[in-house]
Amino acid sequence: GFVAIDTPGIRRTKSQGASIDFYGAHRAHRSIRRADVVLLFLDATQKISKVDKQLCEYIGEEYKPVIFVVNKWDLLVNSMPTEKWVRYLNDSFRAQRYAPIAFITGQTGKNMKALLNHAQMLFKQSRQRVTTGQLNRMLKEALQRTPPPLFQGRRPKIYYATQVSSQPPTIVLFCNDPASISKPYQRYLLSAVREHMHFEEVPIKLYLRRRQASDTRDDTGADEIGPIVDLGEDQPVETG
């Protein structure tokens, strides 16, 4: 079953311009933290606001799956193609371009059942696990297709990857030097993980870790790599 956590309307104060007022922000953030999937409702007749972007940024920081729900679409369906709104959303929320978009009519409930089904699918995606062998076969193909760019005149070495947890799917990538893997290349690898590991529409957390000299494992022995639980002081370097 579903448990809906409703966030009361968020007030904007003059002193904060278009920012969320303190109590509204607190309620919204608490609701986002509690949620397995966030439905961010947007009014089709209004421009995307700074408040919408602030909420979306927090959703990203919490690694929550999100569906952008464009409400009151019946008022615009004859005057604006859905493709234009999709481009508008992708340009406004660049970090969450992977997130699905739903167009609904709140008064009639049209498309609501499909929306809830999609939310359930995102929940299942966020809980999914892949084997280290599957992940490293995909990684090997991605590296062969597009090798990492040179760093200080040398090609970075990426040895293997493993998924250490879910909700969100969390990947640890072992390499010779984490600083040598550029942000664009991290995004490329995350796109490959999303496309081939069936995390198509959910955020993924990626950690880069230096492989220890005593660790001689690589993708050839990937199926034998056990789970890694302790991430120490590492911080996620990129999400997708």
Image: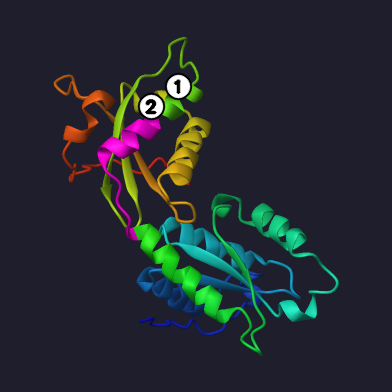
Question: Label 1, on which residue?
Answer: 144
Q: Main secondary structure of the magenta part?
A: helix
Amino acid at the residue labelled 2 = Lys
- Residue located at (64% from left, 85% from top): 106
Q: Give left or right: position of 115 versus 47.
A: left
Q: CA distance from mark 2 to mark 1?
A: 6 Å
Question: Label 2, on which residue?
Answer: 140
Q: Give left or right: position of 41 versus 238.
A: right
Magenta part of the chain: 127-140
**The quarter of the displayed image where residue 231 is located:** top left
Q: Is there a contact, CB below 8 Å, between mark 2 and mark 1?
A: yes
Please identify the quadrant where the N terminus is shown. Answer: bottom left
Q: Position of residue 165 (x, y in %)?
A: 26, 51
Give the residue at the far left of this rendering: 214
Amino acid at the residue labelled 1 = Gln
> Badge 2, how many Cα within 10 Å: few under 14, some, many 20+?
some
119 drawn magenta: no
Evaluate whether residue 146 shows in this view.
no
Give the residue at the far right of this rendering: 79
Evaluate whether residue 184 shows in this view.
yes
In the image, residue 54 above or below residue 116: above
Q: Nearer the viewer, residue 2 or 44?
A: 2
Give the residue at the far top of this rendering: 153
